[in-house]
Amino acid sequence: MSKIAVSTTVNGDPAEFLCDAGESLLDALRGSLGLTGSKEGCGSGDCGACTVMLNGQMVCSCLVLAVEAEGKSIATIEGVAEGSVLHPVQRQFLEHGALQCGFCTPGFIVAAKALLEVNPDPDETEIRYWLAGNLCRCTGYDKIVRAVSAAAAELRQERSAA
Amino acid sequence: MNAPEPKGKFRVVGTRPVRPDGIDKVTGKAIYGPDFVTAGMIQGAILRSPHAHARIRSIDTSKAEALPGVKAVVTSADFPGQSAKIIAAGETSSSLQNIAATCMANGKVLYIGHAVAAVAATTKAIAEAALKLIVVDYEVLPHVIEVEEALAEGAPILHEGMITKGLDPAPDRPSNASMVFTLAGGDVDAALAASAVTVSGHYRTAPVHQGYIEPHACVASWNADGQGQLWISSQGHFDLRNQTASVLHMPSSDLRTYPLEIGGGFGGKTGIYLEPVAMLLSRKAGRPVRLTMSREDVFNASGPAPGIVADITIGASEDGTLTALKLEFWNQAGAFPGSTIHSGVMTALGAYRLPAYFARGWDVVSNFAGTKAYRAPGAPQVAFVVESCLDDIARKLGIDALDLRLKNAARPGDPGPTRVPHGAIGYVECLEAAKAHPHWSAPLGPNQGRGVAGAFWGNYGGQSTAAVALAADGSVQVTTGSPDIGGSRASMAIMAAETLGVPYESVRVTIADTGSIGYSMVTGGSRVTFATGKAVIGAAQKVIATLVERAASLFGVEPGQVEWRDGAAHCLDGERAGESLSISAIAGKAGQFSGPIVAELAVNPLDYLPAFAVHICDTEVDPETGNVSIIRYTTVQDVGTAIHPDYVEGQMQGGAVQGIGWALNEAYVFDGNGRMENPGFLDYRMPVASDLPMIDTVMVEVPNPAHPYGVKGVGEAPIVPPLAAVANAVARATGLPMRQLPLSPDRVWAAIQAAK
Amino acid sequence: MKVILIEPFPGRYFGGRGEFEIDAPNLFALVRALDAIGPGFAEAAGEDAAIAVDGVMRADWSASLEGAQEVLIVPRIAGG
Ligand code: FES
Ligand code: FES
């Protein structure tokens, strides 16, 4: 079976790869593109460890076919920080000890950043429901919720200062 | 939080700095098990049994071997023969035969998902296509899943010739009960007969899974000269190396094993599954081979925690003083013997003063994946039984549930269940803190109930090695062999910085491979901050001794006239009294002394102490649907000393939530063929963020006098009380006993209907 | 010195007997003495036993037992 060539934009840069027709976007990111920050916890859309943004939409990349990325733009955990400046969500995860093993963390950070883009002032319930598609087995979510809340506050402050 | 929280006693211990491995983990740079790649690596895949119990008549791999792109095929015939020798397997021990059979079925498959053959090929797709070409001829045998089936007259026997150990006289016929463990004291039947009240109950829980989000993965490379390399994410690369080398009959030092970041383990990554298979594939293929598990493989073929069936009776006098406890329980151990009945027995007897007791655990095998340690292995199930029964006593006597526990709680100096007296335990302090917490007296709404449960985990110490090395600029390198699952690099750096008197940021921590430092046991048993911490502190103290000696030479005085304080050597006497030399000033002169400043220390401390915990849980039960919501949750725990409070609280919260999942939703559900019906995260329903409230934490600090900073170990205790705390809350909300987990809506609804 | 063994050791190696009076300079010698009574015990103890001397768990079997009153040999309990 011959491979299919796909042209995309990944974290703002042009990227091209070859994939099998049935290959998931997650496998293409982790394999051909060497971006192993997105994790596979289940491969069935149930854990959120593979969360990426596809044309601005939050998706489980394990449920997206790699060929579907043709002509689209993908944002992954590797692109969340600007150079070596951490995004407030990343910084607050660290400040709050919101990760233990850290395996779920990339998915949570991509999802949380997406939340704060559509809802700059989420309450606890909104954070919990937005993140309900991301599994964390280590933390019990408490510190994750606090970190996201703190990041929202930080971003609001930044915005009002600007 | 980064805000310093000075406690007076310590400078760095008890603060909350950012973990040293943090940035790699929030930016996606950290390399976990499935992320590692090495030059020339090819892909493996494993053929797994479709039958719960079957004899393998033959395996024909010829077609698979002929498929282009296939580089190697392996079956149990490629494994060297195994002895019945017992070796350490994580924190438990197991026979080499069973460890090997966990990696590859030998003669018989014992569960659906049991590995029967493996292929390595240039791509994963080719390897998977090759699996379909392997022909296995099975003679299907009847299977058993539940304990009662496994022990029934005429039940199919999993391990031929297995005679129950621990019974006197020994049975003369083989059975599926591998072992019995009993602790007894006093005349329990007489004490129960004389008790003012007794309460009995029959309890049941299902097997559950640790649910770490990272599936198992490894890369192996084994050369023709016998030397190999292994890259794994595990709770202990030394122990996994030892197990792999033993199974493959190779010297341990021939197998250099590199730790990758680990995406959760909770006890489930203390043993080998893929490693020897990948090694054998690599040896045949002459290439490094990667093997990974899918989520379904993880559920079917790694090591869940046992279910339990239990009968208990507890007696008490009118004033609530316990008189006797009688417990018999049967662990649903899965395919291989060795589930944790010992710790179950200890859990039943260790928390309260009991004048008379009898606790007996049975280890019973059946046809699903062999169980493995899961956070406080063996304890949560038994604590569910004991703490639920205690709640019945409290209700029957009209005594406050915390008062009943306070009246009977084990205190320092009381004899423990094996007669070893309790050390500086803090159960009473925890119960008092729970009572004083506003949660305990907050009002409840309609359909709501409040449950409480206390419990403990024994913790562990054991062997660890650590090295502390100073660079010429005075910065500090700490090296250990203990994988960091939940922030232990940070706690090691804190303890080293505290001891040396230097800033936290000047200490960096490496988890070294097996070729770079001496042995350390698995990260498990809540032992790392305690035991590896002791090694780090001790090595740092040796470094200080060298610094002081060298400073004395530089000052021209005796070492006794030099004091190490605040990260510098202070001259107390002589001409230069009052002067000081910084760590860098001394370390930079290594060329004028006997060489660089390095100290390594190997330790084996057993003066660890158990961690006690008390959890308070409020639930609301929907009478229409039977759905249970957790509306408030508070955890109280004696943590000894919290080295990095964020990660201590994180352990308390994470353990509580795993326990909530165990209580409310999680269970292995089997169909009539022994097939797990829910081997995915959609149907094996672990708690998500929207299921939960904030988890309040109260850290009680009763230090362990045997650790320089008072560490006790915190990781496991938090999963022990929640099963009973949740069940007691539901029982109080509904007025009905809740003796079988999980408390899924259908089960709770049926109980409510039956009571109408 | 009083030596107390907790199951499974008495049943497996000592015909159910769980108490002995043995004097030994250190735990290695003590375990050897017990192995002479219950053959196979030494190997099992090396794998599975935890030993407390006067109520305190002891890791180092070579340390002196001078002055010890009671040695308690119990199964090693696993962690996770
Ligand atoms: S790996 Fe995609 S949701 Fe789990
Ligand atoms: S930090 Fe381990 S799964 Fe979330």
Image: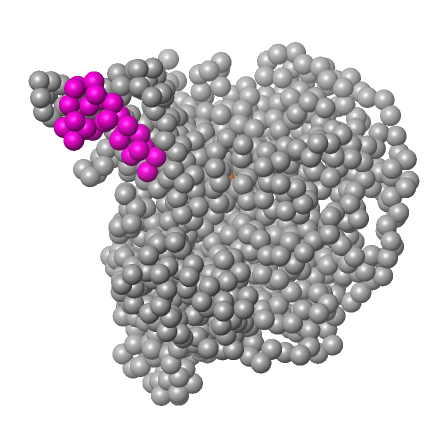
In this orientation, does residue B396 appear? no
The answer to which of B194 and B538 lies nearer the viewer is B538
Q: Is residue B493 above or below residue B444?
A: above
Q: Residue at x 32, y 38 (%)?
A: B538
Left or right: B713 in relation to B114: left
Q: Residue at x 86, y 50 (%)?
A: B59
Residue B539 location, x and y as percent? Answer: 34, 35
The answer to which of C67 and A39 lies nearer the viewer is C67
Residue B198 location, x and y as percent? Answer: 40, 81
In this orientation, does residue B550 appear? yes
Q: Residue at x 79, y 42 (%)?
A: B74
Quarter of the view holding residue B222: top right
Left or right: B642 in relation to C19: left
Does the segment drawn in magenta span residue A50?
A: no
Q: Is residue C41 above or below residue B193?
A: above
The answer to which of A139 and C73 lies nearer the viewer is C73
The N terminus of chain B sits in image quarter: top left
Quarter of the view holding residue B3: top left
Left or right: B331 in relation to B647: right
Left or right: B17 in relation to B298: left
Does the segment drawn in magenta span residue B554?
A: yes
Magenta residues span: B538-564
The answer to which of A69 and B612 lies nearer the viewer is B612
Residue B150 location, x and y as percent? Answer: 67, 70
Residue B263 location, x and y as percent? Answer: 54, 38
Total labels drawn? 0
Q: Is residue B185 above or below residue A146?
A: below
